Amino acid sequence: MKKLSRACLGMLLAAVAVPSTAYAEEEEDSDGITISGSATVVSDYRFRGFSQSNEEAAIQGGITLSHDVGFYIGTWGSSIGFANGTEIDVFAGYSTEVTSGLTADIGATLYLYPGTSNSSVIEPYFSLSGDVGPASIKGLVAWAPGGQDSLGDASGVYLAGDIGVAIPDTPVTLKGHVGYAKSDSFLGGLDGEVFDYSVGVDFSYKMLTLGVAYVNTDAPKFGGFKEAVGADGAVIFSLGASF
């Protein structure tokens, strides 16, 4: 249970982004409903800088149903290195363009670990995204309220910023990410704070995306702590297909 507690809290209180997931092409039916999905293999499932797969490869996939008025619901799953080896996320929210080129998204994610007790975590979130010249940018705020069985009295907030720049007339997109987590727990650092960051590049061809990214955190190094919790620097590879 110690390992499960570390991993669950690490996802919420530690520092993204990171597995590179291929987002789906959209297919819309006559009812205004769009179904999209993805399947991805990653060399290490990193969530906010922390490995969730014991720094081993992971298989991931998800599906989302969205309506043209802005509401959406979906699920996403991954193999992991704890909690019987499976994580399943269920999410729902509402996304809308608040002004030309600026989109707001509000919702919540429920993290589930089948076969384990008192391990689910719910995390509301809010984001703003848009384009600035050739760059796509996104800001995120996510909050894990205390009182949940898996967290006890601990609560946490996660702030993140992402940028992607597509190089014209090429299949290449440059990416950057920085995140900051603050929690009532000491996890990730003795002060309850941890930064994560990543830089990478995606190569796209039709429905396939190959990603390479360097991921790291500022978790303390004493006694091998940073390596033990999978928060050390690493180059992560991913290959995803969208549908």
Image (spheres, grey):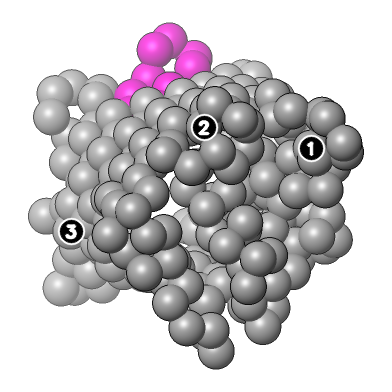
Closer to us: 227 or 46: 227
Give the mark nearest the N terminus, 2 or 3.
3
Closer to us: 39 or 225: 225
Foreground: disc 2 or disc 3: 2
Foreground: disc 2 or disc 1: 2
The magenta stretch is 129-138
Task: Tell me the number on the disc at residue 71.
Answer: 3
Question: Residue 173 lies in what quarter of the image?
Answer: top right
Residue 100 percent coordinates (x, y):
18, 22
Amino acid identity at mark 1: Lys
**Rendered view: 27 above or below 44:** below
Give the mark nearest the N terminus, 3 or 1.
3
Instruction: Give the residue at mark 1.
Output: 226
Most prominent secondary structure in the magenta stretch? strand
Element at label 3: strand
Whether residue 172 appears in this view of the structure is: no
Instruction: Give the residue at mark 2.
Output: 192
Question: Residue 242 lies in what quarter of the image?
Answer: bottom right
Residue under the point 15% across and 73% down: 31
Q: Quadrant of the N terminus?
A: bottom right
Residue under the point 37% across and 26% down: 139
